[in-house]
Amino acid sequence: MKFLVSKNLHANPNYTLLLGFFAVMLLLYFAGDLFYLANFFGHTPLAVLQTLRGDLDAFVEPLSLASLLEHLHVSLFLAILAIFTTMAIVLRLNLQFRHKQLLILVSMSSLFLASLSLLGTYFFCDALVYAYLFFTLLWHLGASYALALILFELWVKKA
């Protein structure tokens, strides 16, 4: 994915400005995604299970498989686009190879594991809801950390 003309992020001041505001918008997207997930599923394990399984006492219907798959399809597509573009910029930062590698590995794998654990919670085991919450928070934090590094490199460091 080569959408940058140069590997030097400071070669063109317009790119610096554009990438900086792009990073800010992605930070807002990640924050908004967490609020969306907390509103849709809930922010506690019990609330997520209540959304997935339903609760007769609270008159909450269980989430249908079609709704769950639709949510996963849309959210995975958007998250993959956001993380891939973020990591494409991270690859051009002046970081050690291991730092970049760990950041990409943690963000990408935790997004994958969050989706798998949500499906596992729906089909197999309620205990996987803890993995879903952990990995969801982890991929958001990893991607947000990458965006913070990008903003620091673009607007503070100014090499």
Image (cartoon, grey):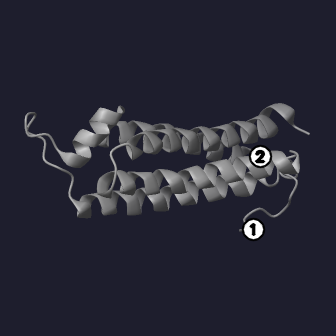
Query: In the rendered view, does 97 fall on the left or right side of 33?
Result: right
Question: On the image, which quarter does residue 150 sit in?
Answer: top right
The 10 Å Cα crowd at callout 1, few under 14, some 14 to 19, many 20 or more, is: few
Quarter of the image for the C terminus: give it.
Answer: top right
> Which amino acid, by three-letter code, is at mark 1?
Lys
Residue pointed to by mark 1: 2
Please tell me in which quadrant of the rendered image residue 95 appears: top right
Instruction: Please indicate whether residue 119 sits to the left or right of residue 148 in the image.
Output: left
Residue 115, horizontal then vertical, whole percent: 45, 55
From the image, state whether disc 2 or disc 1 is nearer to you. 1
Q: Which mark is residue 16?
A: 2
Which percent across, then down, holds residue 146?
Answer: 69, 42
Q: What residue type is labelled 2?
A: Thr
Splitting the image into 4 quarters, where does residue 7 fall? bottom right
Q: Residue at x 10, y 34 (%)?
A: 58
Q: Is residue 25 at least partly visible in the picture?
A: no
View extreme (right): residue: 159
Q: Residue at x 75, y 38 (%)?
A: 149
Residue at the image point whose x is 28% and y is 41% from the top: 49
